[in-house]
């Protein structure tokens, strides 16, 4: 009991505020592993071939304005019809595309600290350094913004665990698609890093009509 | 009472061209216009006029008589622009300046001539300045436009006509100066009524039956017994505040303090007009004659000094004041009515949140340029990459936007430039089993497809020049969904990745 209370205090100190705001994903197994849900006012990392999809699931749950920050030379663009299919709101999407990676981080600090965005999705070519990540974490604390960092190499066939695991993000997810039908998408969700508990792995199904998450199977701890 | 100067520039077209190309100033040349197959002279330089050529001659005739005559194309738009420039220049003498038909300018100098040393001196000044610009000008000053026009065109140059000498002075003027209709003018000339004086000696009733009431009115207008109307150019109030410094500003703190003052003044002026800045520009003149300028754009019209100052101060980070700044000018380039909103108590929190977000968008747009901060707008097309457009987030859409949910599966992300992943010889109709994606081999499981999308045949689109595309959804062995399409062209099938999704 005492340990639990102390843990709470430590997380509160880490996040720089008294109470912890969470975004439940609506799946008890995952929410328990995260001690209630995804931390708001914190940074989360996403890697893997279906990272964009899972980011959309998170951003849909969060609601509000979405800021997408990426450099101008990235060949990818969000596609409004595709967003609509996953219950996204294209009119709530604001894209900021500076030329320079440094500027992307600069924008990220501004947007995160302003506390006007529902979620902020940050995409940079190289993994963010530990200092950079810590700065983002400091900018986002005390807000209720969901901070997401996406590795742009997500769609390539690169085994996970490739990048350094020691960043100051609160969670790190590896997401891949294991099956797809017209009714539902099945994804492999691997919580590689979890500051609220131990790493876990699930296979989750997402219903295309309701966007609810269902557990297909739990595999290992 | 009016005192009108008419400025006639008989060689405006050619002198305008000679001003732009100084090597032409000494040579005779003509300006030509085209009408169907006929090329004719529409204006000519003074020296060409002295050689005996005239407007409306055909170019062939002119070249036959003077084989080395230069000719240039007519540019009426440029001429009008030149006249507008002269109008702006003329506004130094009086605020009431107007442009007449052809190359005439009218200046109402009533109450302004004493500033330039009297009417005679003013006429001389205008004439001398126009001559210095390279324009031949004929001027006349009179109580109304008709008389000023008549004397500028047919009278003595720089004549100064007042009401009491008008009848006497106009006796010897040609009847053409009355600006009557062509029929009446030729009729008068045929009857030997070549001078205005002879016309005046006739009884009015006889004159009216000959030349008609409309042209009689023209005569009355000339002698000031019928009214004439002319719209003078109206100048918009200039929303500029300026400050000069006896001691040049050498620190950015000083510049900021001065900006504060300028913003304060301009915002007070704008608030009286119920308007706010949409775009503001700041010019700074340095002691070494360099000038710097910055501008900021705003999403919603604002006269909030702190907001504007914050936007400007972004530029001040790399401000180089050099030896100091001795003049600052702040201008409101675009203004818009301020929207006044009354907020309910429960709405104010959301409103506040939106305002903060708008401020953020504003700042980001000014940091990186409005084109780097974008939002989606729907567009109506079946071509995948044309179903949306991107607009600057600064400009809010005028109408509420509606998005149509696609009936078939579409990717979350689209590649701006589709990536070629496989080329094969021959025509293949089925989805491939293996592609090269990011330099690695990739095994595929097809999910849905094909979905054929045809290009818009009525439009030339270089991306779609190889005809229709067949789209497939495939899953890669490492767990990514790709949106592939196939193009077959000249016995070759090429596969591209166009999007990613799930």
Image (tube, rainbow, N blue to C red):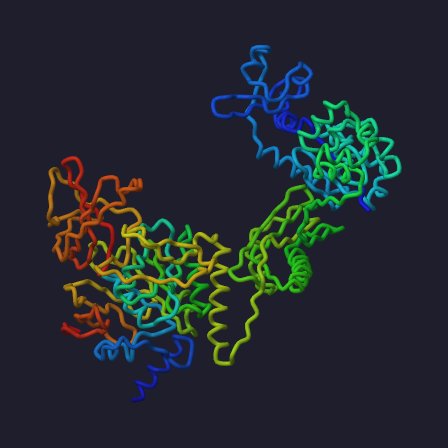
Q: Is residue A52 above or below residue B353?
A: above
Q: Is residue A177 above or below residue B169?
A: below
Residue B157 seen by the camera: no
Residue A117: x, y in percent?
41, 68
Quarter assignment of residue B128: top right
Q: Position of residue A200 (x, y in %)?
A: 20, 72
For this orientation, the residue located farthest to the bottom is A1
- In this view of the protein, which residue sits in the foreground, B432 or B247? B432
Side of B436 relative to B176 (left or right) = left
| Residue A107 in sight from this viewpoint | yes
Q: Residue at x 35, y 71 (%)?
A: A63
How many marks on residues? 0
Could you say which is closer to the camera, residue B110 or residue A93?
B110
Q: Quadrant of residue B159?
A: top right
Q: On screen, A18 above or below A103?
A: below
Q: Quadrant of the C terminus of chain B?
A: bottom left
For the point 22% across and 40% down, the residue is B466
Q: Point out residue B160 in the picture as x, y percentages from the top left corner.
A: 84, 34
In the image: residue B467, left or right of residue B208: left
Task: Determine the residue located farthest toward the right in the rendered image.
Answer: B164
Q: Nearer the viewer, residue A13 or A107?
A: A107
């Amino acid at each position: 009991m005492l340990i639990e209370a102390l843990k709470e205090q430590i997380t509160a100190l880490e996040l720089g505020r008294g109470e912890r705001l969470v975004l439940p994903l609506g799946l008890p197994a995952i929410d328990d592993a995260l001690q209630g849900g995804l931390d708001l006012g914190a940074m989360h990392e996403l890697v893997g071939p279906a990272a964009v999809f899972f980011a959309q699931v998170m951003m849909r749950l969060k609601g509000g304005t979405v800021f997408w920050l990426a450099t101008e030379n990235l060949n990818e663009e969000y596609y409004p019809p595709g967003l609509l299919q996953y219950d996204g709101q294209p009119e709530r999407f604001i894209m900021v595309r500076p030329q320079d990676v440094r500027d992307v981080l600069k924008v990220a600090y501004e947007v995160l600290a302003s506390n006007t965005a529902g979620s902020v999705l940050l995409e940079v070519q190289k993994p963010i350094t530990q200092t950079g990540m810590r700065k983002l974490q400091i900018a986002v604390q005390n807000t209720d913004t969901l901070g997401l960092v996406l590795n742009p190499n997500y769609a390539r066939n690169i085994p996970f665990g490739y990048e350094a695991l020691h960043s100051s993000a609160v969670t790190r997810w590896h997401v891949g698609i294991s099956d797809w039908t017209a009714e539902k998408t099945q994804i492999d969700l691997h919580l590689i890093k979890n500051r609220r508990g131990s790493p876990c792995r699930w296979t989750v199904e997402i219903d295309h009509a309701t966007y609810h998450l269902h557990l297909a199977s739990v595999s290992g701890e | 009472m009016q005192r009108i100067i008419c400025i006639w520039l008989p060689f405006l077209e050619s002198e305008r061209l000679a001003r732009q190309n100084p090597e032409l100033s000494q040579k005779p040349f003509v300006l030509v216009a085209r009408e169907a197959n006929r090329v004719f002279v529409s204006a000519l330089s003074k020296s060409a006029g002295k050689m005996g050529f005239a407007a409306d001659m055909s170019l062939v005739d002119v070249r036959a008589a003077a084989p080395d005559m230069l000719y240039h194309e007519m540019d009426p738009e440029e001429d009008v622009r030149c006249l507008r420039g002269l109008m702006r220049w003329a506004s130094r003498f009086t605020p009431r300046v107007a442009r007449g038909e052809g190359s005439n300018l009218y200046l109402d100098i009533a109450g302004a001539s004493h500033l330039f040393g009297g009417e005679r001196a003013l006429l001389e000044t205008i004439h001398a300045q126009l001559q210095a610009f390279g324009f031949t000008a004929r001027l006349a000053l009179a109580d109304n436009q008709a008389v000023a026009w008549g004397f500028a065109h047919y009278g003595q140059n720089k004549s100064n006509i007042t009401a009491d000498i008008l009848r006497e002075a106009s006796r010897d003027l040609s009847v053409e100066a009355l600006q009557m209709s062509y029929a009446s003018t030729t009729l008068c000339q045929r009857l030997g009524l070549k001078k205005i004086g002879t016309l005046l000696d006739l009884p009015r009733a006889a004159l009216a039956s000959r030349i008609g009431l409309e042209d009689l009115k023209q005569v009355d207008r000339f002698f000031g017994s019928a009214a004439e109307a002319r719209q003078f150019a109206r100048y918009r109030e200039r929303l500029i505040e300026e400050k000069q410094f006896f001691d040049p500003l050498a620190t950015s703190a000083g510049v900021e303090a001065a900006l504060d003052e300028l913003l304060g003044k301009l915002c007070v002026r704008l608030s009286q007009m119920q308007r706010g800045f949409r775009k503001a520009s700041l010019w700074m003149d340095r002691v070494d004659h360099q000038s710097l300028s910055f501008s900021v754009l705003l999403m919603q019209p604002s006269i909030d000094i702190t907001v504007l100052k914050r936007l400007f101060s972004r530029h001040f980070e790399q401000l180089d004041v050099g030896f100091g700044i001795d003049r600052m000018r702040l201008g409101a380039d675009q203004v818009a009515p301020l929207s006044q909103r009354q907020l309910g108590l429960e709405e104010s929190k959301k409103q506040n949140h939106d305002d903060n977000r708008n401020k953020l968008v504003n700042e980001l747009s000014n940091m990186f340029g409005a084109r780097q901060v974008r939002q989606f707008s729907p567009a109506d097309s079946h071509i995948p990459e044309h179903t949306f457009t991107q607009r600057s987030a600064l400009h809010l859409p005028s109408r509420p936007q509606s998005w149509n949910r696609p009936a078939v599966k579409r990717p979350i992300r689209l590649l701006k430039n589709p990536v070629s992943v496989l080329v094969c010889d021959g025509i293949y109709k089925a989805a491939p089993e293996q592609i090269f994606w990011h330099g690695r081999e990739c095994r595929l499981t097809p999910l849905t497809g094909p979905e054929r999308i045809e290009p818009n045949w009525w439009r030339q689109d270089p991306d779609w020049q190889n005809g229709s595309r067949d789209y497939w959804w495939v899953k890669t062995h490492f767990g990514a969904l790709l949106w592939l399409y196939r193009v077959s062209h000249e016995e070759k099938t090429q596969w591209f990745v166009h999007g990613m999704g799930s």
